[in-house]
Image (cartoon, coloured by chain):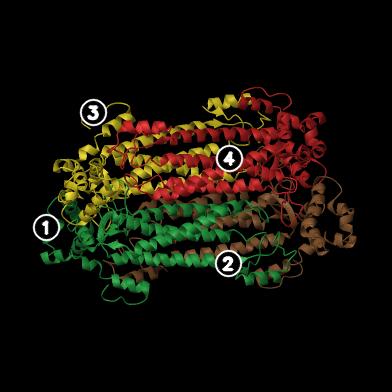
Chain colours: A brown, B red, C yellow, D green
Amino acid sequence: MVGRTHGVHAEPITFGLKVLVWYEELGRAQERLSRARAGIAVGKLSGAVGTHAHLSPDLEEEVLGSLGLAPDAVTTQVVQRDRHAELLQAIALLGASLEKIALEIRHLQRTEVLEVEEPFREGQKGSSSMPHKRNPVNCERICGLARVLRANAHAALENVALWHERDISHSSVERVIVPDSFLAADFMVTQLREVLEGLNVYPERMRSNLEMTRGLIYSQRVLLALVQAGRTREDAYALVQRHAMAAWRSQPDLATRLLADPEVSRVLTKEKLLACFDPTHFTRHVNRIFERVLGEPVAAGR
Amino acid sequence: MVGRTHGVHAEPITFGLKVLVWYEELGRAQERLSRARAGIAVGKLSGAVGTHAHLSPDLEEEVLGSLGLAPDAVTTQVVQRDRHAELLQAIALLGASLEKIALEIRHLQRTEVLEVEEPFREGQKGSSSMPHKRNPVNCERICGLARVLRANAHAALENVALWHERDISHSSVERVIVPDSFLAADFMVTQLREVLEGLNVYPERMRSNLEMTRGLIYSQRVLLALVQAGRTREDAYALVQRHAMAAWRSQPDLATRLLADPEVSRVLTKEKLLACFDPTHFTRHVNRIFERVLGEPVAAGR
Amino acid sequence: MVGRTHGVHAEPITFGLKVLVWYEELGRAQERLSRARAGIAVGKLSGAVGTHAHLSPDLEEEVLGSLGLAPDAVTTQVVQRDRHAELLQAIALLGASLEKIALEIRHLQRTEVLEVEEPFREGQKGSSSMPHKRNPVNCERICGLARVLRANAHAALENVALWHERDISHSSVERVIVPDSFLAADFMVTQLREVLEGLNVYPERMRSNLEMTRGLIYSQRVLLALVQAGRTREDAYALVQRHAMAAWRSQPDLATRLLADPEVSRVLTKEKLLACFDPTHFTRHVNRIFERVLGEPVAAGR
Amino acid sequence: MVGRTHGVHAEPITFGLKVLVWYEELGRAQERLSRARAGIAVGKLSGAVGTHAHLSPDLEEEVLGSLGLAPDAVTTQVVQRDRHAELLQAIALLGASLEKIALEIRHLQRTEVLEVEEPFREGQKGSSSMPHKRNPVNCERICGLARVLRANAHAALENVALWHERDISHSSVERVIVPDSFLAADFMVTQLREVLEGLNVYPERMRSNLEMTRGLIYSQRVLLALVQAGRTREDAYALVQRHAMAAWRSQPDLATRLLADPEVSRVLTKEKLLACFDPTHFTRHVNRIFERVLGEPVAAGR
C-alpha cells in the first residue's frame, strides 16, 4: 500500500509494517502500565502523620502483606501522589497510542481512501438519516476519550504538591479522575480490540490507491538513480521535481515524461529508469524489520 | 462539493458554505479577544498590598490615564490573574478555531481528495528527498501550535489562586506563556491568512469527488421520497440501506439498483426517483444562509 | 489585619478589602458565564451537513423559537464547538476564582494564623483519629475540583477542530466533561457560599498577628519618611533593612532600634518616627476603594 | 516539630522525616527520568516511510551505533512520539515533586511559622519597597515553572497521534516544549539544590510551634489511653473532643482540663495521663523508617 506523509502519498509500504508500528508501541504502553502498577502497589498504616506513633511498622507489614501490598517505606498521612500521577500518566499515554491507531483507521476509512473499515454489523445503522453511511464511530470515540485521559493526567499532576503531612484537596479530584480514567481506558482497549479483530481490509483499494499518482511516489528512487548516474543532487532534484509537478494533474505520467527528456535518457537507459518504478524494491527490507521486532524470521507468506 | 461526516461522504454542500462557517467562527474569536483585551486594559498603583498606603488613588488615576489604562477598582499587590487567564483562554480558543480551518485544509489536500492545496512557491521543496511532494506544512504547523496555546491557557488558570495579597509563582509562568502565546497566535494568524489568500482550489476535483460514490450521497432524499410515497420510515430505511450497501463497492450504482427494485418502482416513478439525485436541490438554501450571516442578499454569481 | 505577600507579612490591610477583591472577581466570573450562556443558547435544524436540504430555515426558526433558542446562523451537522469550549472555559475560570477564595481561607485557618475558620458543626468530627482537629475540608475540596474544571476545559478545546462537516469524536468527551463541569461548579459555588455564610472570623487573632513582627511591617513608611527627610533612597533602604533584619528574631523591636540610631534621630524626631507605626494610616483609603467598586459611599461602621 | 494535616497541627514528627519523604520521592523521579532517557535513546535512518528503501538496516546500525544510539526497531518517517511524551511526562512529574518541596518551604517560611527560610544573601533586597522582607522567591519560581512543565507534557501527548507515516504538526510543538521543559527543569533542580544547601533551619521555632496548641496535638494518644482503660471509642472521642475544643482558644490547656474531669481521673491516673503528652513517644519509630529507606541503621546523633 502507499505510505503517506503530511497526508500526501510518499512511498510504498505494507499494511503489516503499519500494524507492526502499533504492536511495538503498545508493547511500550504495556511496560509503562506494569511499572506504574508496581509503583502503586504499596500501602501504609503509619498513622496520621507517617510516624507509626500508634501502630508499629511490624503490624503494618503484616496487614499490608495480607493484602498483597508492600509497605511504602516512608509516608506522610498518605502515600505520596507522584505514584498516582505516574499511573494516570501511563494511562493517558496508552490512550494517546490507542488514539493514534484509531485515528489511522478513521483516515483509512474515509470514502476517498477506503482501504480499511471498522466492522459493521448486519442491520446496524451508520446514520439515522442517511442509509448509505458506515462511519468509524468506535474509532472516533476512542479518539475523543484520549482527550479525557490526558486531561485527567494533568489534574493528577496538580495533586502531587500537597501541604505538609497532607491536605485533602487531591481526594475530590481522584474520586473523579481515577475511576473515569480506568473505565475509559478499559473501554477504549476493548473497543479497539473489537475493531481490530473484525477490521475489514481492502487490498484492492490499497493497490489502486498505490497507483493513483501514476508513479509519482517513485520520484526519490529516480532522483537517486540520476545522482548515481552522475548528476548533481541539486540538478537531479530540480529535473525530477519539474516533471513530477507537471504529472500531478495532467497526462502523461512521470515515467513517460522522464523517458521523453533527453537529460534523463542521456544518463539512464529505459530499463534502468523503469526499474525505479517497482514497489517491491521499496518493501524488500520489511521482513527484516519484522525480525527486529519479533525476534524471529517471518514466514514467507507474510 | 461533497459534505463529509465521520470522514465519509454525506450530502452535497458548497465550498462557500464551509468557508462561511469559518468566517462566522472567527468573528466570535475576534469578539472574545476584544473583550479579553478590554478586561486586561487596567493597571494599578495601589502599593504593596493594594491599600494606596503611600500613593493616593488620585495619582493612580492620573498616571494610568496617561498610559491609556483604567485603574483596576480593587487590587492586591497585583491585578488579579483571572484577567490574564481570560486573555490566554481567548487566545487558546482562537488557536483552536485556526486549527480547525488548518485541519480542514490538510484533509482537503490529501492526495486522494486534493480539492484544495496550500500555496506552493515555484522552486519550493516539498520534501528534501521526494521531489514529487507538496505538503500542507503551514497548516500542519498551525495545528501544532494550537496545542501550545491551550497548554499555556491551562497554566494561566493555575496562576489565578495566589496566596494572600500576592505570591510571585505566577511570574515565572507568565514570562514563558504570555510572549509565547502572543507570538504563536500572531504567527498562526499571519500564516493562515497567507494560506487562504493563496489557496489553490480545484473545482473539478470537488465535482469528481462528489460523484465518486455514484449517487450514494442522495440516499436520504430517496428515503424521504419513499416515506412521502407511503412507506414506513423503517421499511424505507432498510430498503435503501440494502441497495446502498451493495452499491458501495460494486456496480451498478444506487439509482440503477433502486429502479430495478419493484418495491421502489411500485411507489415512485423513474422521474421522481432520479430527481432525488440532483445536487442543486441540496444547496438551494445556501444563499439564504449567507444572508443570515452577512445580513444582506448574496449576488447571484456566488 | 496584616497583608501578606510571598506568605510574609507585608503591610496592614483590612479583611473587608480582601473580601472586596473576591467580590469584584466573582462579578467578572458572572459576566463571563452570562456571555458564554448567551453564546451557547443557539440550536440548529439544518440537517446532516448544515444545508437545510430537507427542512427549511423557516421551520428551524419556528422550532428553535419554541425552545427559547436562536438558530445558529451557519452550521455543519452540529453547532460549532468553540461555543461549548467558551462555556467550559468560563466554568474553569470561575473554578479558579473559587479556588483562590478557598485557598485563602485554608491559609487563614492554619493553626499558626487562625484568623478565620470554616463553619464547624456541633458534634462534627474533624478527624476520625485526632479529636482536636477542625479542618477546612470544604475549601480543600473546592481547590481540588478546580483542577478537574480546568482539565475539562482543556479537553473542550481539543473538541473544536472536528473533521469536515463533523466527526463524532467530541461526543464521548462531552458526555463526561459537560455534566461533570456543571455538577462540580454548582457544588463548589454552593459549598463556598455555605462556608462564607458561616465563616468564623477572629478579629483578635488578626490584631495579634498584625503585631507579631513588632513593627517590621511599617518599614516602608519609615523608609519614605527618611527619604522625605533628605536621605537618599539607597542609604535609607540599607539603614532600615539593617535594623529590620536584626529585629526579625531578637529584641528590641524596630522602632526602638531606629530611635537609638543617631543616623535616624538626626533627621527624624521621635514623634515623627513613631507616627510611621500607625496601622490606620495604611488603611485610610480603603473606604474610597469600596466606593470605586460599589459605586457608593460606605457607611462609617465598616 | 509539629506535623500538619489540612494546614492544622496534627501530631509530632521530625524535620528529618519530612526530608526523607522528599529524598525517597526524588529517587522515584530519577528512575523515571532514567527510563525515559533510555526510551528515547534510539534513532532511525529508515527513510521517508520507515522501509529502509534506500539505505539498508545495516548502515543504520552502524551510523546510530557511532552516535551511541540504538536503532528503533520499527518506525515510520520518524521515531514514534510516545517516546517523547514519556520523557516530557517524566520531566513534568519531576517538576511536580520539586514543586511539592518548594511549596513546603514556602509554607514553613510564612511569618507565622518561620521554621525554615530560603538562603538570603547579605545585601539582597527582599522587596524593592519594604526593607524588612525576606521572601521565598526561588521556591515560588519553582512552583510556577512546574505549571509550565505539566502544560508541556499535555501538549506532548497531543503529538502522539500523527497521521499515517507522519505529519509534521508535532514539530512546531516540540521546538517550544522540548527546550523549554529541559531548561526549566534544569533551572528548577539547580535552584532547589541551592535552596536546600543553604536552607536556614530554626529548631527553636519548631519547638515553640510544637507547643503552640498547649497539648492539643496529643489528643489521639489520650483517646487511645481512655479506650485502653475501658471507655468505648465513641465516648472517649466525645469526651476528648469536648475538652479539646474548649482548649483551642481559652485557658487552661487540654491536660489541665482532662485532669479536672472525674470521667477521666476515674480511669486514668495523673501519671498515665501526662505520659500521653510526650512528643518523643510519637517519633520513636523514625529511625526505623530511615533504615527502611536507606537500608542501614541511622547513627544515634540523628
Q: Are marks 1 and 3 in contact (CB under 8 Å)?
A: no
Camera-side residue: C212 or A35?
Answer: C212
Q: Amino acid at mark 1?
A: Thr
In primary-sequence order, the first of circles 1 and 2 is 2
Q: Nearer the viewer, mark 4 or mark 2?
A: 2
Residue highlighted by disc 1: D256
Q: Position of residue C110 (x, y in %)?
A: 27, 51
Q: Mark 4 — residue?
A: B97
Chain that bears disc 4 = B
User: Relative to D238, is B293 above or below?
Assistant: above
The residue tagged with tag 4: helix, strand or loop? helix
Mark 3 surroundings within 10 Å by alpha-carbon count, few (fewer than 14), some (14 through 19), many (20 or more)? few
**Looking at the picture, which amino acid does disc 4 mark?**
Ser
Q: Residue B242 at what x, y percent from top left? A: 74, 43
Q: CA distance from mark 1 to mark 2?
A: 66 Å
Q: Residues within 10 Å of mark 2 (few under 14, many from 20)?
A: some
Q: Which mark is residue B58?
A: none
- Report the residue marked by disc 3: C299
Both labels 4 and 2 in a single chain: no
| Disc marking residue D41 | 2
Question: Residue flagged by tag 2: what amino acid is it?
Answer: Ala
User: Quarter holding the N terminus of chain D?
Assistant: bottom left
Tag in front: 4 or 1: 4
Q: Is residue B276 above or below residue D299?
A: above
* Quadrant for the C terminus of chain D in the image: bottom left
Seen at 35% across and 71% down, the residue is A62
Q: CA distance from mark 3 to mark 4?
A: 49 Å
Q: Is residue D283 visible?
A: yes
Whole-number angstrom distance, CA of label 2 to CA of label 3: 69 Å
The residues bearing labels 1 and 3 have C-alpha atoms spaced at a distance of 45 Å
Farthest top residue in view: B297
Q: Label 4 crowding class (10 Å Cα cut-off): few <14, some 14-19, many 20+?
A: many
